[in-house]
Amino acid sequence: TLAFDSQAMLRDRVYGIKETLFHDPYYQRHVVGAPIVRKIDDQGRLHCEANYAVFRTKLDGPSTVFNVGRYLDIVVSTPQGYRFAQRLCVYDSEMIPNSIIYPI
């Protein structure tokens, strides 16, 4: 998975993207549906869900569906506005493409 539990893990992913991976150029489109508020807890946090789809288009080919699933979010109110306190990405498929280099 692409969990980033520490700055070292994030640095490792950035290094992998910049220095070690070669892939054909492509565009990636990330489409997120309208969120649904499933619950507001005792602390006023919003527990939301939103579907997403990621499409990938190589420069010389058709667009393909790369990954789909849903986000399970916890959103909190701050002085700067609403912010994500937590975001979990749940893939619909158990088969995760080995070409994932950027977080979904």
Image: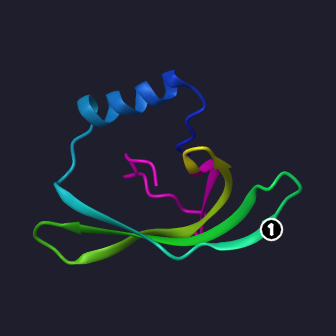
In the rendered image of this protein, does residue 47 appear above or below residue 43?
below
Q: Which residues are magenta?
A: 82-104
**Camera-side residue of 67 and 104:** 104
**Camera-side residue of 75 and 50:** 75
Which residue is under mark 1?
39
Position in image of residue 36 (x %, y %): 66, 75
In the rendered image of this protein, does residue 71 appear above or below residue 101?
below
- The amino acid marked with disc number 1 is Lys
**Camera-side residue of 24 and 102:** 102
User: Quarter of the image containing the N terminus?
Assistant: top right
Residue pictured at 37% horizontal, 52% vertical: 99
**Label 1 Cα neighbours within 10 Å, binned few <14 / some 14-19 / many ≥20:** few
**Element on which disc 1 rests:** strand
Residue pictured at 24% horizontal, 29% vertical: 19
Identify the residue at the far right of this view: 42
Identify the residue at the far front of this view: 79
- Quarter residue 34 falls in: bottom right
**Camera-side residue of 28 and 45:** 45
Q: How is the image coloured?
A: rainbow
Position in image of residue 4 (x %, y %): 55, 35
**Left or right, 59 with reference to 96:** left
Position in image of residue 12 (x %, y %): 42, 26
**Left or right, 38 with reference to 58:** right
Position in image of residue 92 (x %, y %): 59, 70
Q: Was residue 103 drawn as part of the magenta stretch in this picture?
A: yes
**Left or right, 42 with reference to 21:** right
Residue pictured at 20% horizontal, 78% vertical: 62
Q: Was residue 62 drawn as part of the magenta stretch in this picture?
A: no
Residue pictured at 46% horizontal, 55% vertical: 104
